[in-house]
Structures are given as C-alpha cells and as structure tokens.
Amino acid sequence: MRILLVAAEIFPLLKTGGLADIVGALPPALTAAGEDVRVLLPAFPAIRAGVAEAQPVARLQAPWGEEAQLLFGRLPLDGGARRIAIYLIDAPGLYERPGNPYEDAQRQPYGDNHRRFALLGWAAMRLAQGLDAQWRPELVHAHDWHAGLAPAYLRFHTPQVRSLFTVHNLAYQGLFQPWNFPELGLPAEAFQVEGLEFHGQLSFMKAGLFYADRISTVSPGYAREIQTPAQGQGLDGLLRARSHVLHGILNAVDDAVWNPATDALLPRTYQQPDGRAMHGKALCKAALQAELGLHAEAQAPLFIVVSRLSEQKGLHLVLEGLDALLAQGGQLALLGSGEAWMQDAFRARAAAQPGRIAVRVGHDEALAHRLFGAGDVVLVPSRFEPCGLTQMYGLAYGALPLVHRVGGLADTVTDCTLENIADGSANGFVFETFDSDAFARAVRRAFALYARPIEWRRVRATGMRQPHAWAGAAAAYIALYRQALQAA
Ligand code: ADP
Ligand code: GLC
C-alpha cells in the first residue's frame, strides 16, 4: 500500500511532544511490514536541515495564490541503517521561522497559522491527485489538527483517495476566525455544523474528524473518553456519531531509540534484571545524582519527571506532594519546559532544597534518557492523557510509573495492589481520583514497595519485560488503512 503520513513534527528533527516520536517511529515500522510509506512535512528550518539531498519535485500553488515548492528527500536514521522518505513543503514566507513550529517567541500562535497548516493539508491532496508523477498515495494518514484539512480537501477534490485521521490530543483544535474560510479552497457547504464549523469558528480538528474515512486515537481508553462530554472538548457528539469508524491504537516504544540495553546516551547500558539488582541502573543513578548536584544516596528513591509543563500534565500535584515525598526520603529530578509559573515554582523548590530536588528547565533529549536510566519512579499524574509515552519509557527503563488512572496511562500501568503483585500483573502505581490525597497515597505505596527490594525488583522486571513494540501497532494501523480503502 502506498501511504502518505502528514504531520507537523518528526523525531529526531523537530519535536515539541510525543507526536514527533510517533511520526518518527511509525514509518520505519510500516516499512518493515512491507508498506510503501512517505511523510509530508512543512519545511521548518530544523526539518529542512535534516533531510538529505532534498530535490524539487513540483511547484505547488496554495488556494490563496501563494507559490511553494514540493521537495523530496530522505531522513537517515541510526547512522543510515534506516531511512524515511520525506516530502517537504518549501514555502519560506510561511515556515522559515526559528524555534517552535506553532508559536512566536512570546508563545503566541502565529497569526497566519490557518494558512501555514491549510497548505499542509492542501499539499497532501495535491499529492493524492498525482502532483508527483513518480508516486501517488492510495491512502493519506493525517495527524492532529495541523493536518486536519487533508481529509476535507480529499473529500471535496479527490474522493477516490481515502484517509485516516489520528487524534493525538483533542485539547489542541486549530480554531480560526470564520473570515479566513474563503482562503481555504473549500466549497461553502464545508462551513456548516455538518462540516468544519465549530461555534462560529473554523476547526481544523473537526475537519479531520468529520471528513476522514476512519478516525483513530492513541489509546483505547482515550477513544472511549473523548466520546463523553467530560473529555470530548465539545466534539463528543460528533465522535459518538462516528464511533463506528473510531479506533484506539496504543502508541508503542521505538526500540532503536528507547532501549536501556543499547542506549548510547546512558553512561552505562543495562539489561532486564533476572531477579537480581541492575548494576547498570545503579551506576546511571550515581552519575545523574553527581551531574545534577543531588546527594549521592544510592538508597534514596529517585523520582523523575520529564514533561511539558502544562495544565494537562497535573504537575501541581507533584508540587503539593513534594514535602511528603522528601520527608519519606525521596529525591526529585525534573526536566521540563512550558508555563512560566510552573517553571518558576519548581525552580524555587530546587533552590530551597538543593541536594534533594534538581530542576532543569528546557528541552534536552539526552538528559531525558539519563533521567529514565537513573530514575526509580517516573511521575505522570496527568489530568488527562491521550496515550503518554513517558510512562512507557519508564516501564522499559525500570523506572516504575506513578500515574493518574486516565487515558493511555490507565491502559498501560497496573497498580501495585497486593493482588496485582501476587498475580504478577503489577508494574507501577495508579491513583484514581485526581487530587493531592490520592496522589500522596500512591507515593506512599511507592515507598512501601521500595522498602521491599525483592518485590520491587519483581515489579520492575514485569514492566521491563512488557512489549510495547511498534510491530503490533503498525499491524493495527495497516488493518485500519485496509478498512478505509474498502469503505464505500
Ligand atoms: P506529550 O506529547 O503530551 O507532551 P508524551 O508523553 O506523549 O506527552 O510525549 C512527550 C515526549 O516528549 C517524550 O518523548 C518525552 O521524553 C519528551 N519530553 C517532554 N519534555 C521534555 C523535555 N523537557 N526534554 C526532553 N524531552 C522531553
Ligand atoms: C499527544 C498526547 C500524548 C500522546 C502523544 C503521542 O501529545 O498528549 O498523550 O502520547 O500525543 O501520540
């Protein structure tokens, strides 16, 4: 099958969150399964710089008249062992801006985002029409609101080419003012409730949800949750109406990037424990404590956070629970960036208790690996979480996840109750109600288990053994692509 993935980010070139990890890992997994995959991306500077020998393929004209070039090149991975075929939309006036792909330096969305991301969907449709004489997709797989117009353009301009739209996070919807509609190159009938209109605005997310032949999201749990008013962000009615084409496919872990036995970013690699202590992990922990200025206490449980600092991630619970965590003898190492008040709050706590709390503000891929390598517990207390990758990286690296029971976190983490420990299913700590009491009790459970090293090692080994391999997720996507192609 010829499949075109359409997205705004790709690891390792440009990443603001888990979307990039998925867009970087799914193509090689589909290729390994025998599919013919290409990825379409805006030529943001970091992406342009990383795509080797990008050659012009065709000229592209946006519906509002702007001229762009379509380029084609390859993204080498693992020193060239794997490569991803990439189309780039070269439109310097739209994309050649430093930093974040969506916002300016003041963290305001760019005023022309409707154009910047309409062109992404438009280029996907033009490729489906045969813009590149060498390769034409049979199916377009669009990711998040950035690519949400692709299914709409296909429906109106190239209905024979089918689409799958994947929601990574319903909270970011791509809403724009209605007077931008005439620029988009869609017929008037698209601007209504049975279309992309959303409370008088244009919603790129709704366009994807409404016009795609199939919809997926990144965990079975989140697929159910977004059909409820509580989590549907105003789109639950549409999602319930389309529930027959909505699927939850759990994200996976890219073994070539996230594997403690081969991870070159760790000071010391280590294997799955065979009931014995992992000396490699102990060395990673000692090295990290030294690096971050934490006390060199091998026995102190090290709690880590690697996260965007946003409302979604529920990290105020960590702030509220920090005194209790320290009082029980723990340490905290946090890497994150986002909302200024939260950065400041964590920095202030670290300044007040150096040696026990270390905070690094910024995005640092290598430090993230060292944190998972060193950590005993990874905290992911998200208010909501479509899938979540850091709890899965924690499982793979033997940092037991402590999570709120929601979305993909509930699908991947099983609490250390006595019965779950007894039957060998426990792999972390789960709290039910989203409040500081429930969080504090889960932290106490973590300390209680840590005080029983044999059981701790068993639970840790369970998590490290659990396969979250891409082959399974890729097979599920392929089945969905086939369904979309067969749709009448
Ligand atoms: P989301 O996409 O909602 O941010 P995920 O858990 O799906 O959440 O993915 C987050 C990804 O971003 C993971 O790969 C995580 O390691 C990474 N990450 C988050 N914050 C940072 C940071 N400050 N530095 C490095 N990596 C980070
Ligand atoms: C989104 C979600 C996150 C998910 C990621 C990759 O950013 O917030 O839960 O893991 O996309 O699908």
Image (tube, rainbow, N blue to C red):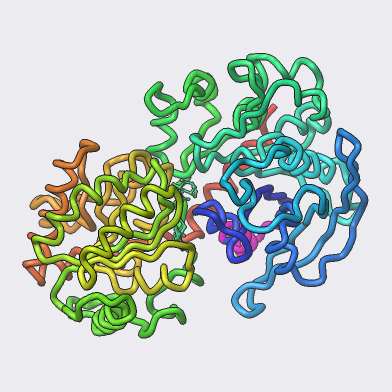
The answer to if 332 sits in the magenta stretch is no
Instruction: Determine which quarter of the picture holds residue 486.
Output: top right
Image height of 57 relative to 229, above or below: below
Q: Residue at 33% of width from left, 69% of height from top?
A: 397
Q: Residue at 28% of width from left, 45% of height from top?
A: 316
Residue 55 is left or right of residue 474, and the answer is right
Q: Main secondary structure of the magenta part?
A: helix
Residue 38 visible in this rendered orientation of the protein: no
Q: Residue at 45% of width from left, 51% of height from top?
A: 338
The answer to if 31 sits in the magenta stretch is yes
Q: Quarter of the picture for ligand 1?
A: bottom left
Image height of 412 relative to 357, above or below: above
Q: Residue at 82% of width from left, 33% of height from top?
A: 158
Residue 55 is left or right of residue 414, and the answer is right
Is 405 in front, or is 479? Answer: 405
x and y percent of residue 149 in the render? 71, 34
Instruction: Determine which quarter of the picture holds residue 83.
Output: bottom right
Region of the chain picked out in magenta, as a range? 25-36
Quadrant into which the C terminus falls: top right
Image height of 265 relative to 222, above or below: below
x and y percent of residue 414 in the render? 23, 50
x and y percent of residue 353 in the render? 21, 66
x and y percent of residue 282 in the render? 24, 81
Is 118 in front, or is 280? Answer: 118
Instruction: Determine which quarter of the picture holds residue 157.
Output: top right
Residue 52 visible in this rendered orientation of the protein: yes
